[in-house]
Image: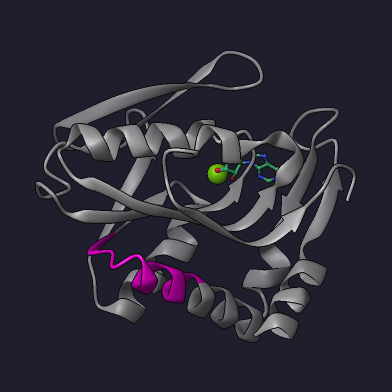
């Protein structure tokens, strides 16, 4: 598995100055394009979710859907979409979080989780941790429990770990500044 994780890291493409100048964007489409790498990523995230004894996966729009849904299917547990504000059709609850410039909002259906249900949040990448932290807040406001957060990538220099200190989390590959 360790070699396969290194292959995932090698396949991630750096795109400088996307979507705005100064951001080094981690493009995971080469990983998605390779069935072996994608199944390794899904298997590794599934192992984490199983270890956390999660009962539900919450995937964050939109790359968290691509990874989270196959993990839910692999484990035979439900998948819940956490979406950008205004996209879910039923009654929702909303959380705001800070972006580099301004704020953003994510939502989940009010009835998406049962009380006390153990939820693992899945997203493609942990940067500052604002998005994941807002998703954790939504889970807790429904009365469910955050069993953990799983990411394909962590940008360690942005210190998302500090923001997620109250929670268990796992990332498959880590990048330092400029890497
Ligand atoms: P943050 O809330 O700062 O942890 O940002 C995490 C979210 O923004 C994830 O959903 C990522 O998809 C996206 N994101 C942030 N920084 C990057 C980056 N350098 N490359 C790709 N996606 C990013
Ligand atoms: Mg994202």
- The structure residue drawn at horizontal position 76% and vertical position 67%, both measured from the top left corner, is 9
Residue 152 appears at what percent x and percent y?
Answer: 60, 61
Quadrant location of the N terminus? Answer: bottom right
Residue 39 appears at what percent x and percent y?
Answer: 55, 82
Quarter residue 151 falls in: bottom right
- Relative depth, front residue between 98 and 87: 98
Residue 110 covered by magenta stretch? no
- Disc tally is 0
Q: Is residue 122 above or below residue 50?
A: above
Q: Is residue 80 left or right of residue 90?
A: right
Q: Is residue 70 left or right of residue 91?
A: right
Is residue 38 at least partly visible in the picture? yes
Q: Is residue 107 left or right of residue 22?
A: left
- Relative depth, front residue between 160 and 66: 160
Task: Farthest residue to the top: give it.
Answer: 102
Quarter residue 101 falls in: top right
What colour scheme has been applied to the protein in the rendered image? Answer: one colour
Residue span colored magenta: 45-56
Q: Quadrant of ligand 2?
A: top right
Residue 68 appears at what percent x and percent y?
Answer: 42, 63
- Relative depth, front residue between 151 and 88: 151
Q: Is residue 112 left or right of residue 63?
A: left
- The structure residue drawn at horizontal position 44% and vertical position 46%, both measured from the top left corner, is 61
Residue 75 appears at what percent x and percent y?
Answer: 31, 78
- The structure residue drawn at horizontal position 53% and vertical position 75%, both measured from the top left corner, is 44
- The structure residue drawn at horizontal position 64% and vertical position 39%, both measured from the top left corner, is 127
Is residue 108 at least partly visible in the picture? no
């Amino acid at each position: 598995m360790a070699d396969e994780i290194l292959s995932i890291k090698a396949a991630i493409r750096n795109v400088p100055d996307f979507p705005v100048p100064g951001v080094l964007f981690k493009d995971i489409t080469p990983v998605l394009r390779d069935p072996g790498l994608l199944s390794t990523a899904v298997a590794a995230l599934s192992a984490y979710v199983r270890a956390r004894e999660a009962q539900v996966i919450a995937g964050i729009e939109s790359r968290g859907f691509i990874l989270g849904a196959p993990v839910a299917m692999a484990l035979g547990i439900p998948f819940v979409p956490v979406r950008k504000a205004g996209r879910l059709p039923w009654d929702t609850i909303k959380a705001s979080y800070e972006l580099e410039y301004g704020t953003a909002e994510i939502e989940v259906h009010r009835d998406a989780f049962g009380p006390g249900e153990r939820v693992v949040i899945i997203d493609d990448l942990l940067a500052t941790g604002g998005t994941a932290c807002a998703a954790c807040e939504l889970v807790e406001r429904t009365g469910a429990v955050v069993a953990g957060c799983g990411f394909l990538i962590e940008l360690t220099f942005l210190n998302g770990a500090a923001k997620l200190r109250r929670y268990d989390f796992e990332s498959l590959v880590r990048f330092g500044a400029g890497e």
